[in-house]
Amino acid sequence: MSTAPTVAAGAVVGYGAIFNAGLFHFDGRYHLFARGVRSGYSRNTESGPRFLNYLSDVLVFVSNDGLHYEFDYVLGAAGSHGVHCFEDPRVQRVVSEGVEHV
């Protein structure tokens, strides 16, 4: 057991906080899907949204042992099609016609 985060804030260039992850073991590897908040946001001191310039994406990390994770890719990027935040990703196994899909 460790008190250190699984993936530390700032572990990916261009991102600050990384949190609310979902974990999935597939094909012998661990896949961690987490919300990554892009660097550059700030607290709003006026009325309105709590934060300014707040964009969050879904980041994917992989691990062979479930303890040490490496950044793999951005699964969903905010800022297009009117979406400013992707939050709290979850992954499920689905079986369709006897074939498992992730």
Image (cartoon, grey):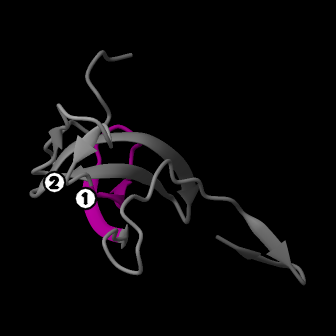
For this rendering, which residue is in front, 73 or 62?
Answer: 73
Residue 10 quadrant:
top left
Q: How crowded is mark 2: few (under 14 residues within 10 Å), some or many (20 or more)?
A: some
* Amino acid carrying mark 2 in the image: Val
Numbered disc 1: secondary structure? strand
Asked if residue 45 lies left or right of residue 89, the reply is: left
**Residue 33 picture location, percent across and down:** 44, 54
**Residue 85 picture location, percent across and down:** 39, 58
Residue 73 quadrant:
bottom left
Residue at image location 32% in from the left, 34% down from the top: 6
Asked if the stretch drawn in magenta spans residue 57, the answer is yes
Q: Which mark is residue 13?
A: none
Residue at image location 35% in from the left, 37% down from the top: 67
Write the start and end of the magenta stretch as one range.
Answer: 55-74
Quadrant including the N terminus: top left
For this rendering, which residue is in front, 31 or 91?
Answer: 91
- Do the CB atoms of the residues marked 1 and 2 lie less than 8 Å apart? yes
Q: Tag 2 or tag 1, which sits nearer the N-term?
A: 2
Residue, disc 1: 71
Quadrant including the C terminus: bottom right
Residue 98, above or below 38: below
Asked if residue 95 lies left or right of residue 34, the reply is: right
Residue at image location 56% in from the left, 52% down from the top: 24
**Residue 36 picture location, percent across and down:** 30, 51
Looking at the image, is mark 1 or mark 2 nearer the viewer?
Answer: 2
Question: How would you classify the magenta stretch by its main secondary structure?
Answer: strand
Residue, disc 2: 12
Q: How crowded is mark 1: few (under 14 residues within 10 Å), some or many (20 or more)?
A: some
